[in-house]
Amino acid sequence: MRIRLRDLGKYVSYFSELRRYSAMPGAETVAWKDLYPCLGERTSVTGFDTHYFYQDIWAFRKIFESGVREHVDVGSKVDYVGFLTAITKVTFIDIRPLRANLSNFTSLTGSILSIPFPDGSVSSLSCLHVAEHIGLGRYGDPLDPQGTIKACRELRRVLAPGGNLYFGLPVGKPRVCFNAHRIHSADSIRSYFDGLALKEFSLVDDSGIFTVGADIARANEARYGCGLFHFTR
């Protein structure tokens, strides 16, 4: 077990508590190999990742309210994809297939740069916190500075007339945090989907505040916000 100096005090408290627990009547024997220090969870409130929490709720609600019988997702968080199977048939596309045993679920091995559907064939489509990674090699994909742009164009290609695209990624002052992700201006994302109508823009700002129907100009001033775009064709 490697202990960082800054965590030394937490480990001292942990082992002190372990000794007290082990001395209590009825306490189980704790083997060294079974130690599992959890040191950062004594918080006054429940913490959560504001980007993923709000974006998944935002997209799930829209898909539920749309009443679609089939939905396609490209590379989003698997928890979100799994929950969607409770309300509709889901086809999940990722370079790393999801081996999950669920009804209403199909997993396809594929790339967001080459979605395995014909032009204009997908009526309900989502891609959340994915496109910002494309072309940085994080997931074994080829390096490409135009990765996000190409991903957006491919999503646009497969969206059917009258279809809905629920799209999210980090927005703010443009930069790349290699090899994790890019941050794009919200205006540039809108231009990448030229030809589609922006039905709604929502935002999780730098303070973690979620606003439905936000002013897109606010997003351009963020450092690491989450822009949520509902496009239609």
Image (cartoon, rainbow, N blue to C red):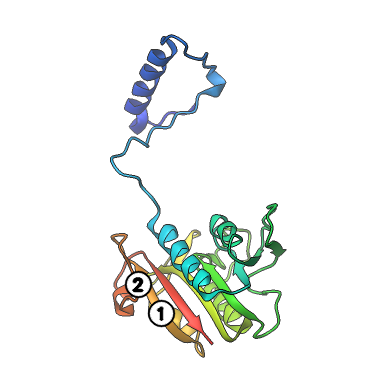
Query: Secondary structure beneath disc 1?
Result: strand
Left or right: residue 51 compared with residue 141: left
Residue occupying image coordinates x 33% and y 78%? 216
Q: Nearer the viewer, residue 194 or 136?
A: 194
Of callouts 2 and 1, the N-terminal one: 1
Q: Which mark is residue 200?
A: 1
Q: Which mark is residue 184?
A: none
Can you say whether 162 is above or below 52 in the image?
below
Bin the neighbour count of mark 1 within 10 Å (Cα to Cα): few under 14, some 14-19, many 20 and up.
some
Q: Nearer the viewer, residue 169 or 175?
A: 169
The residue sitting at the bottom extreme is 195
- Please indicate, yes or no, whether residue 177 appears anywhere in the rendered image: no
Q: Nearer the viewer, residue 166 or 147?
A: 166
Q: Quadrant of residue 40?
A: top left
Quadrant including the C terminus: bottom right
Q: Position of residue 122 (x, y in %)?
A: 64, 79
**Disc 2: which residue:** 212
Q: CA distance from mark 2 to mark 1?
A: 8 Å
Q: Amino acid at mark 1?
A: Glu
Query: Secondary structure beneath disc 2?
Result: loop
Q: Nearer the viewer, residue 51 or 45?
A: 45
Q: Position of residue 33 (x, y in %)?
A: 56, 21
Residue occupying image coordinates x 63% and y 63%? 141
Q: Position of residue 131 (x, y in %)?
A: 53, 69
Label 2–label 1 contact, CB within 8 A: yes
Bin the neighbour count of mark 2 within 10 Å (Cα to Cα): few under 14, some 14-19, many 20 and up.
few
- Please indicate, yes or no, whether residue 228 appears anywhere in the rendered image: yes
Residue occupying image coordinates x 38% and y 13%? 20
Q: Amino acid at mark 2?
A: Val
Q: Position of residue 221 (x, y in %)?
A: 29, 72
Q: Quadrant of residue 6?
A: top left
Can you say whether 178 is above or below 12 in the image?
below
